[in-house]
Amino acid sequence: MSIRATGEPTFQIFAKINIIPGKSKSITFDMSANDTILDLKKVVHSKELVPPDQQRLFFFGKQLKDERTLADYNIKKESIITVALRLRGGGGIGFNFSSMENSKKLGFSESAPSWRKIGPGLNLSGKCLNTSCKANDIWVKKGIGEFQVGEELFKSNCPECKKREVKLDNIGFWKCRYVAEGYNADSRKQIEMDATTNDDESMITFDSTQANWGYLKITTYKI
């Protein structure tokens, strides 16, 4: 690790990390402003046994370079770092979800069941895996706000049986502005999106193409 002067002040930062697909956890570190990003990766390694070369670190959507310091990126007390993991050879460890590459409009039907109702803002779609539930293809309303999609996949409930036995794999937006940022581990690209939908008769969703995400943050705003 880099050299630290005696008495150099430390501060606590937070990291959100996907250890298994669809489930995130938060960990904390005591670091110095002069510590490098590689130093931080080594601390992650000591706590989570993930080698530094299998980590990608992000702060406000920007990938961090090993040789730079925390101060270079203005990382301060209680800053939140996103840790995206990857396998050797470049394969991603994160969660599978819509690639969000090919958008389309999806119209509404007055005969749709209650578990397929959506609302303004963010909505997630998939299936309920509870065999005793009459719902199958479902939409889960999330609304307006900031969402870490990997976490939402893990903590969402079926709108019919209310059980957390769902597999969600797509996304929909209605009557909102939506901003997305993330890291697509399959294409090794940073993804950014900013768009608005204000159609009373349809919502914006995407085709069935999936991607492995290191992380994906969605923010929706009222219009």
Image: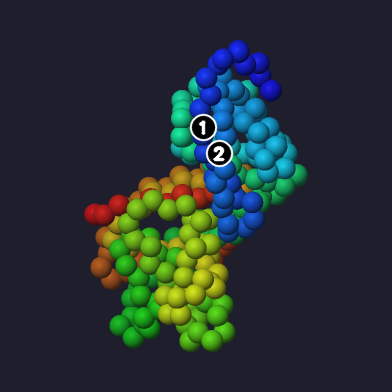
**From the viewer's perspective, is residue 207 above or below residue 131?**
above
Whether residue 80 is visible: yes
Label 2 Cα crowd, 10 Å radius (few <14 / some 14-19 / many 20+): some
Direction from residue 73 to residue 110 in the image, left or right? left
- Write the residue at 53% across / 24% down: 10
SS at mark 1 in the image? strand
**Extreme-front residue of the structure:** 7
- Write the residue at 30% across / 83% down: 110
- Write the residue at 33% across / 80% down: 109
**Contact check, label 1 and label 2, Cβ < 8 Å:** yes
Q: Quadrant of the N terminus?
A: top right
| Percent of width and height locating residue 50 | 71, 42
- Write the residue at 65% across / 27% down: 39
- In the picture of the structure, the residue carrying the numbered disc 1 is 12
**From the viewer's perspective, is residue 167 above or below residue 62?**
below
- In the picture of the structure, the residue carrying the numbered disc 2 is 28
Direction from residue 104 to residue 13 in the image, left or right? right
User: Residue type at mark 2?
Assistant: Thr
Picture mark count: 2
Q: Quadrant of the C terminus?
A: bottom left
| Percent of width and height locating residue 135 | 47, 82
Disc with the residue nearer the chain's start (1 vs 2): 1
**From the viewer's perspective, is residue 48 above or below residue 125?**
above
Of 121 and 48, the residue lying toward us: 48
